[in-house]
Image: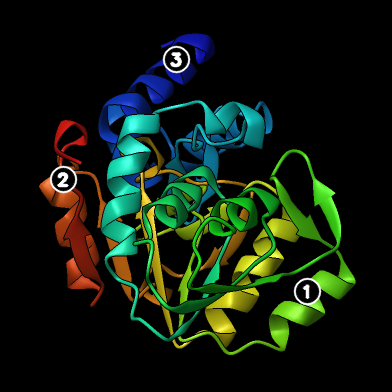
């Protein structure tokens, strides 16, 4: 098999199965593991996959700007947002991380839900201004247009000083083995801090972000207490999370949300 054909085969396997195990593929193609690893390094260097221990994962599609993401899959995000909002305990302190699915959750909060919310995402803060019983803390700093949230030393320090009972984590990429990952290093740092300071952490994930990776590691999948999946998310994925002790909930189909 020519090198170009072999790499195309690797990408096809990634598309169909969602992962590459270098040892298994080397046996299938009757090649050395070193050859497969070199191919994976080359494909990762070209931004076509993400290297992980023992193989590779496809890159998450969630690398576009916040403005672009806000207009994508709005009905599916609304369904996930409703399910995520149902996890909120009245009277608690909740941190809402950046992201359009978390924005959908903020919009789904009941009008008279008494709550204290902290966020570094101006769009989420604006949505919560319409909720009369929400006490809002907006964490400031330099706002990234790509992520749609504030970053910087002061932002991080303010997040570190909080002790939210629940954090709604924005997800760029999630895999039961590879864990949570992000596309921006400062975004990843905020997310790692939230994993450390929060009592519980929940996340809602679109199907296309499952079994994918991104350049900056955030934490193990087990760092999440609860994952909200779409109604038609694969059972195999849900089962992999449950085996790791993660509570799995499913959103209603978009037309029922």
Q: Nearer the viewer, mark 3 or mark 1?
A: 1
How far across and down, in percent of the image, does residue 43 sit? 58, 28
Q: Helix, strand, or loop for circle 2? A: loop
The colour scheme used here is rainbow
The residue positioned 43% from the left and 37% from the top of the image is 32
* Residue contact between numbered discs 1 and 2, judged by CB atoms under 8 Å: no
Q: Is residue 19 visible?
A: no
| Image quadrant in which the N terminus is located | top left
How far across and down, in percent of the image, does residue 228 sit? 28, 57
The residue positioned 59% from the left and 60% from the top of the image is 217
Looking at the rendered structure, the number of numbered marks drawn on it comes to 3
Establish if 127 lies above or below 50: below
* Residue contact between numbered discs 3 and 1, judged by CB atoms under 8 Å: no
Give the mark nearest the N terminus, 1 or 2. Answer: 1
For residue 156, the mark is 1
Q: Nearer the viewer, mark 1 or mark 2?
A: 2
How far across and down, in percent of the image, does residue 207 sit? 31, 39
What's the CA distance linking mark 3 and mark 1? 42 Å
Mark 2 lies on residue: 252
For residue 64, the mark is none
Mark 3 lies on residue: 8
């Amino acid at each position: 098999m020519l090198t170009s054909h072999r790499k195309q085969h690797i990408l096809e396997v990634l598309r169909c199965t969602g992962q590459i195990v270098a040892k298994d593929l080397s046996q299938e193609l009757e090649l050395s593991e070193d050859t497969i690893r070199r191919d994976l390094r080359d494909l990762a260097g070209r931004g076509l996959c993400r290297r992980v221990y023992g193989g590779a994962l496809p890159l998450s599609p969630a690398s576009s700007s916040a403005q672009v993401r806000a207009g994508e899959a709005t009905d599916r995000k609304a369904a996930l947002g409703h399910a995520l909002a149902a996890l909120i305990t009245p009277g608690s302190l909740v941190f809402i991380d950046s992201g359009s699915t978390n924005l959908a959750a903020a919009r789904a909060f009941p009008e008279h839900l008494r709550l204290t919310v902290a966020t570094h995402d101006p769009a989420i803060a604006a949505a919560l201004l319409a909720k009369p019983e929400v006490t809002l803390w907006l964490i400031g700093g330099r706002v990234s247009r790509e992520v749609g949230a504030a970053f910087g030393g002061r932002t991080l320090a303010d997040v570190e000083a909080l002790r939210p009972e629940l954090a709604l984590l924005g997800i760029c990429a999630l895999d039961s083995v590879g864990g949570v990952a992000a596309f921006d290093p400062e975004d990843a740092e905020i997310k790692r801090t939230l994993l450390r300071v929060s009592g519980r952490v929940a996340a809602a994930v679109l199907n296309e972000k499952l079994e994918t990776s991104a350049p900056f590691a955030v934490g193990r999948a087990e760092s999440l207490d609860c994952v909200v999946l779409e109604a038609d998310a694969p059972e195999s994925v849900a089962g992999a999370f449950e085996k790791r002790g993660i509570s799995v909930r499913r959103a209603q189909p978009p037309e029922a949300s």
